[in-house]
Image: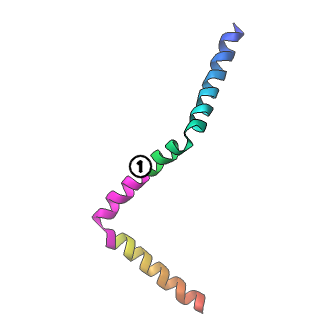
C-alpha cells in the first residue's frame, strides 16, 4: 500500500528533474521566445515612442546628474 505512493512520487520528481536537466536550454528558449514575441509585437506598434522616448530621457537625466 505504501509502495504505490512511494514510487509514484519518486517517478514524478525524477522525471521532472531529468527533463529540466536533459534540456535546460529548451525551457529557457521557450521563455525567451514568448517574451521576445511580446516585446517585438509591442515594439513594432511604436518602436520610437517606447524605445527612444524612454531611453532618451533616462540617459539625459542620468548623465547631467552624474556630472554634477
Residue 68 located left or right of residue 45: right
Tag 1 residue: 34
Magenta residues, start to end:
34-48
Q: Nearer the viewer, residue 25 or 38?
A: 25
Q: Is 50 one of the magenta-colored residues?
A: no
Residue at image point 66% right, 22% down: 10
Q: Is residue 27 left or right of residue 56?
A: right
Q: Position of residue 34 (x, y in %)?
A: 41, 49
Measuring from the top left, give residue 47's x and y in whole percent.
32, 69
- Where is the N terminus found, in terms of image quarters? top right
Residue at the location (59% across, 87% down)?
A: 66
Name above or below for residue 44 compared with residue 51: above
The single residue placed furthest to the bottom in the displayed view is 68
User: Where is 21 relative to 68, above or below?
Assistant: above
Snapshot quadrant of residue 11: top right
Please provide percent x and percent y for residue 49. Answer: 33, 73
Amino acid at each position: 500500500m505504501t509502495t504505490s505512493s512511494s514510487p509514484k512520487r519518486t517517478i514524478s520528481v525524477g522525471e521532472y528533474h531529468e527533463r529540466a536537466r536533459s534540456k535546460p536550454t529548451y525551457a529557457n528558449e521557450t521563455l525567451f521566445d514568448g517574451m521576445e514575441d511580446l516585446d517585438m509585437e509591442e515594439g513594432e506598434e511604436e518602436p520610437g515612442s517606447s524605445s527612444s522616448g524612454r531611453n532618451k530621457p533616462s540617459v539625459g537625466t542620468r548623465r547631467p546628474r552624474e556630472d554634477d
